[in-house]
Amino acid sequence: MTTVSTRAATRRRLGEVTVTSNSSTQQYQTLDAISSSSSSSSSSHISSYHDSYNSINMVPFPPQELSLEALNPFPISVFSYIIFLASALAVWVLYLLLPRGFRKQYCHANRKRYARRMDQRMPAAGYWLPVHSSMQQQEKLSVVSGSSTPGIPTVVDTKRNNPNNSTPLSTGDLTSSPIRHTAYGQRSLSNPPSPDHPALKTIPPNKIIAETMARLQGRGIRLIAHGVHCDPKRVWIRLQDETSNLNDKMPSLSSTKEEPCVTWQTEFPRRVPDQSGQVSIVLMRGSLHKIVLKQILYIDVGKKTQALQLAKDIPDSTCWSLLTQNGSLDLQANSKLERDALVSCFSMILDDVHEEDWRALYEASPEPSLANSSVANVHRGVGI
C-alpha cells in the first residue's frame, strides 16, 4: 500500500512540473511576439524620419538668399577674416619699415606726417623776427645809392667746391648783402668773402645765409652751449658792433671805435611771484660775455672739442665750435641746416677779419680737442 501511495504522489508532482513548463513556454512566446512588434514599429519610425529629412534637404533656397550670398565678398568663416586682418597689418608694417627715400620716390609719401609750412618769418629758434622788412630796406638803400659801398661784398661766391650750383643769382641776392657796413674789415671786391668751409659738403642757399646773418645782427640766435665741467645751457649769440651801440647809447662818444665782437648770454628760467601770489616762470638772461672777432682762429664742424665729445646723446650734424686764443665756444644748433648756415656766416666774417687765409693757418695749429671750453671757464669764474 505504501508503494502505491508513493507512486501516485510522484505522478502528481510530474504533472505539476509539465504544467508549469508549458505555461513558461507560453510566456516566452508572448514576449517574443511583443519584442518583434516593437522592433517593427521602431524601424517604421526611423524610416519615416529619414524620409522627412530627405524631403527637407530637397527643398531649394529662396532666390533672395541666393542673391545675398552671391553679393557678399567676405567669407563667413571667422578664421579667414582674422587671417585677412593679420595680412593687412603685416603689409602696413612692412611699408613703415621701408626707407624714407624709397617711400618718397615710389609711394609719393611725405617725409613728415604733416606738410611743412613755409613760414619764412619764423626762425628755427621759435621767435618771430621781421627779416624780410630789413632785407627790403637794404635793397631800397642799395638801389637808391646806385653804387656799392667799399668793403661790403655784394656777391657771395658759392661756386667754390659746389659745381652743381649753376643757378644765377637773383636781384635780391645781388643788391642785399648778408654783411652790414660794420668794422669787420676792408676786403677788396676782387676777393670777396666766401661761405665755404672745408668741413661742409654742401653750402646753404644765399637766401638762408642772408636771413641767418640778419638774425645774428638783430636779436640773436638761441643755441645750446656745452662745457666740460658744467651742464648744457641755452645761450643767445649775437654779432655786436661796438661803434653802433655806443652811438645809440651815448652820442657824445660817436668818434670812439672799438673792435666788433660776438656776444653770448645764458638763458635760464626763474620763478617770479606776482601781486596775487601766483608764481610764474620767466626766462632770464645771464651776464654778457664777449669774444672779439679777431680772436677767433677757426671754426670746427662736428664733435671735435672735448666738451662736445662728452655729450653722447646729441648728433654730430648739429655741433660746431668757435676756437679762440683763450678757449672754445662749443655750440649745438637746432638743425643741420641752421648749423651749416651759421658756419657759412662766420666763415665770411673771418674772411673779412683776417688778412691771411685762416683756413690754411689752422693747419699748423694744435689739435682742436685740446682747447678748453669757454662755458667751462665762465662756470669756474674765468671768463673770456
Image: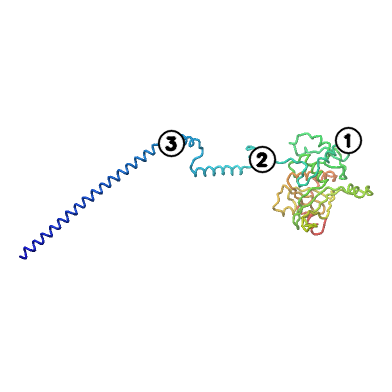
* Element under disc 3: loop
Residue 357 percent coordinates (x, y): 82, 44
Q: Name the amino acid type tagged 3.
A: Phe
Q: Quadrant of residue 273?
A: bottom right
Q: How many marks?
A: 3
According to the picture, the residue beneath numbered tag 1 turns out to be: 144
State which quarter of the image contains the C terminus. bottom right
Q: Nearer the viewer, residue 18 or 154?
A: 18
According to the picture, the residue beneath numbered tag 3 turns out to be: 61
The way the protein has been coloured in the rendering is: rainbow
Residue 377 visible:
no
User: Which comes sooner in the sequence, label 3 or label 1?
Assistant: 3
Residue 38 percent coordinates (x, y): 27, 47
Q: Quadrant of residue 40?
A: top left
Q: Which mark is residue 192?
A: none
Q: Which mark is residue 110?
A: 2
Q: Is residue 77 left or right of residue 251?
A: left
**Circles 3, 1 touching at the beta carbon (< 8 Å):** no
Q: Farthest residue toward the right?
A: 252
Q: Is residue 168 above or below residue 126?
A: above
Q: Name the amino acid type tagged 2.
A: Asn
User: Which comes sooner in the sequence, label 3 or label 2?
Assistant: 3
Question: Which class describes the residues within 10 Å of circle 1: few (<14), some (14-19), or many (20+)?
Answer: few
Residue 282 percent coordinates (x, y): 78, 54
State which quarter of the image contains the N terminus. bottom left
Question: Which class describes the residues within 10 Å of circle 3: few (<14), some (14-19), or many (20+)?
Answer: few
Q: Name the amino acid type tagged 1.
A: Val
Q: Nearer the viewer, mark 3 or mark 1?
A: 3
* Element under disc 1: helix
Residue 319 percent coordinates (x, y): 74, 49
